[in-house]
Amino acid sequence: MEKEAIISKLHLKFAKKTWKDTFQLVRRCMEKSRDKSKPCKQLVRCLERLQEEFDVSSMNTMRSRLEMIARQQQMGFHFTGATCYLTADLFYLEVLLLPCGGVEEVKVAPHGQSPVPSESLLQLLRCKCFADFSVKLGGLFAHYSIPGDNDIKLKLLASLQHLGKDLQQISQFPRPPAHCDPKMDIINNGSIGYLKEDDPLTIQFYVPPTDTMKTSDSQTTDLEAAVQAAHVTVGSSAVPHQLQMASLVPQPPQLDPQGHPMFAPLSEVPNEMLPACFLLRLQPAIPVMLSFVKKLNQITDVAVPDVDLQWAPLPKLLMGGSLSANSHWEKLDEQESIFTVPLPGGVMHSYILPGAAWNMPAHGGIVVDRVAFTHPAHVSALVDVLRHQCAINTLLRSCFSVRCSGPGLFCDLHFEVRPESDSSFSVTFQQPNVDSLAVLLVNVSSPHEITCTLFGRGTFDPSINEYISTVMKRCMSIPVTMNTLNSKLEEITSAPLSPRRPATTEAENDHSASSSAAATDTNRGSDTFSQGSAVPEDSFGVSASACFVLSAATSELPPEINTSPPVSPHPLTPAEGVSTFDEQDLI
C-alpha cells in the first residue's frame, strides 16, 4: 500500500508537467549517473521514448536526437553553433542544422581526409527516419572498427581506400548499350555490379525480376529492397596477408583480350604484410551450397572455417529467411514440407521438396555473411559465383515464398522438386489430359544461362524447351513457369490432329519416336529429341501446330535425372511403365 501511495503522489506531482520539463528532468538524472560512460539503461530508454513523442521542429530538438543516436552507437558527440559532430576513432560525421530543425548537409570524414557529403545519410535525416539513420550509422561504425593498434589501423584504412579507388575505376569501364533498365543491367551483368560510392563502399550485384519493379512510382524503392549487395570493408585474420598500399590499376586502365580488367602485380607496388584481409559483407547473408563455397575459396585462397560442421539442406536455409507469417505450409515430418503457392486466375499449386533427396552434403550449404579476399581482381570472380548462387536460390524460393492465407486449400496442380546436381534440379508433375508424369529438368549453368528440358509421354513441339527456358529466365519463378507450361501442354494435348497427320496408335507413336531417336543418336550423339521440318511459329515463338511425337517412358530419361520414385504425400502407382497420380489422393 505504501508503494502505491508513493506512485500516486508522483503521478499527481508530474500530471501538470510538460513533456519538455520531463525531458529535462531525465537528462539531469542521466548527468548525475554514477558511471557516465555507461548511463542507466532505464533512463536511456526513457529518454528515447520521450524523444519519440517530440516533433523535431527546432535545432535543439534535432541536436538532442543526434546526441542520443551517437550514445546508442558508442560514439562521441559535441556541437559548435549549428554544426553537430558525431565522432569515432577513424571517422566523424558533420551534420549542419537549420534553425527550424531541418538538416542542410551531412558529411563523412575518414581519418586524414577531407569531409565528403553523404546523400543517403542526409535523406534519412531530412525524412526524420531516425531508426534507419541509426542503423546506417552503426554499419558505418562497424566498417571503421578496424582491429589492431593505431599503426595497424591506419595502414589497413589506407589499404582499404586504395582498394576502393581501384574498384571505382573498374566499375567505370564502358559497357555495351543495355536492352533493359541501365541500372538493373549493371547490377546483374556488370563486372562487379553497381558500385554505390557511399561510405562504406557498397556493391549491388544481383536483383531478381519482379512485377513490382515495373511500376514507375515504386521502382526505386522496390529495387533497393530486393537487391543483393555487399559492403567492402576489412577484418582481422589469424593468418597475415599481403595487402596493397597503392593502386593496382595501371593508368590508363586496360582490359585483357577476354575483356577483364588488368592489374599490376602486387609485388611491383607498395604493399604490407598485415594481420587482416578485405571483406565483402553480404547484405543480406546468402545461403551458399558447399560446392560454391569451395569455388569461393579457390578464387581467394582464404578458407571459410568449419564449413563441413555447419552445413544444412539448402531448402531449409532458404526457408529460414523466406517464410512469412502468412505463408501456408504443412509439415509432413522433420525433413519434408508442402508449400501452397497461389497464382493469378485463382490457380493454386502445391510444392514438395523431399527431405530424403535434399538432406545430403552434396545438396547442402551454409549461410555466408562475409567473403574474405586479398586482391581487387578477386571481386569480379566472387561476384560471378555469388550471382550464380543467388539465381538458384531465387528459383527455389519461388516455391515457398509467396504469401497464402488459410489452411485446407484445394490445389489444382502438385509438383515435386528434387536436386540433380549442384546447379540443376527436376520438377515432376502430372501431365494435363494424359495419365502419366512428366519431368522438367532445369539446368542453371550460370545466372544468365538457364535451360529447361521437358520429358514426358505425349505430343510435344520440340520448340517448347526453348520457350519454357525463355519464360524461366524472364520471371525467375518455378510456379509461374510451371503454370505457363501446364497451359501450353493443355493447349497441345487438346488440339485436334493435323489433317496431314493421320491418327496413330500409342504403340505406333512409341515405335516412331524410338526410330527417330535412334536416327538422331546416330547423327548427333545422345540428343533425345527428334527434330522435324520447320513449322510456322506463333507470337510466343512456339509452333502453331503440334505435330511432333516424343516417347518419354521412364527408361528414356537421361541418366542425370534421378529416376527413383518421387517422395510425395500423395501415393503414386505405376501404370504402363510410367508413374501416375491417383486422382482421389490428389484431391
Image (cartoon, rainbow, N blue to C red):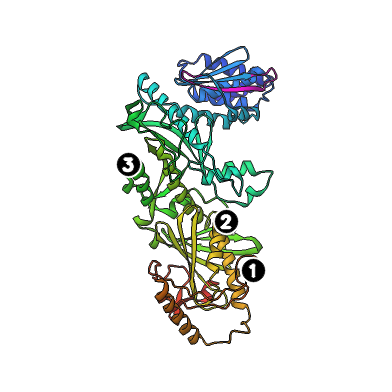
What stretch of residues is rendered in magenta? 97-113
Picture quarter with the N terminus: top right
Mark 3, secondary structure of its residue: loop
Q: Residue furthest top?
A: 81
Disc 1 versus disc 3: distance between alpha carbons? 52 Å
Q: Is residue 114 left or right of residue 333?
A: right
Mark identifier at residue 303? 3
Q: Which residue is mark 1?
A: 538
Residue at (69, 17) in percent of width and height: 99
Q: Would you call the spot at circle 3 few (<14 residues within 10 Å), some (14-19), or many (20 or more)?
A: some
Q: Is residue 463 visible?
A: yes
Mark 2, secondary structure of its residue: helix
Q: Which percent across, then down, holds residue 202?
A: 50, 35
Q: Would you call the spot at circle 1 few (<14 residues within 10 Å), some (14-19), or many (20 or more)?
A: few
Q: Nearer the viewer, residue 435 or 114?
A: 114
Q: Which percent across, then down, holds residue 457?
A: 50, 77
Q: Which is in the foreground here, disc 1 or disc 3?
A: 1
Q: Which is in the foreground here, disc 2 or disc 3?
A: 2
Disc 1 versus disc 2: distance between alpha carbons? 19 Å
Residue at (42, 74) in percent of width and height: 523
Q: Which percent across, then down, holds residue 294?
A: 34, 48
Disc 2 versus disc 3: distance between alpha carbons? 35 Å
Question: Which comes before the other along the chain, label 1 or label 2?
Answer: 2
- Dot 1 and dot 2 residues touching (CB under 8 Å): no
Q: Amino acid at mark 3?
A: Ala
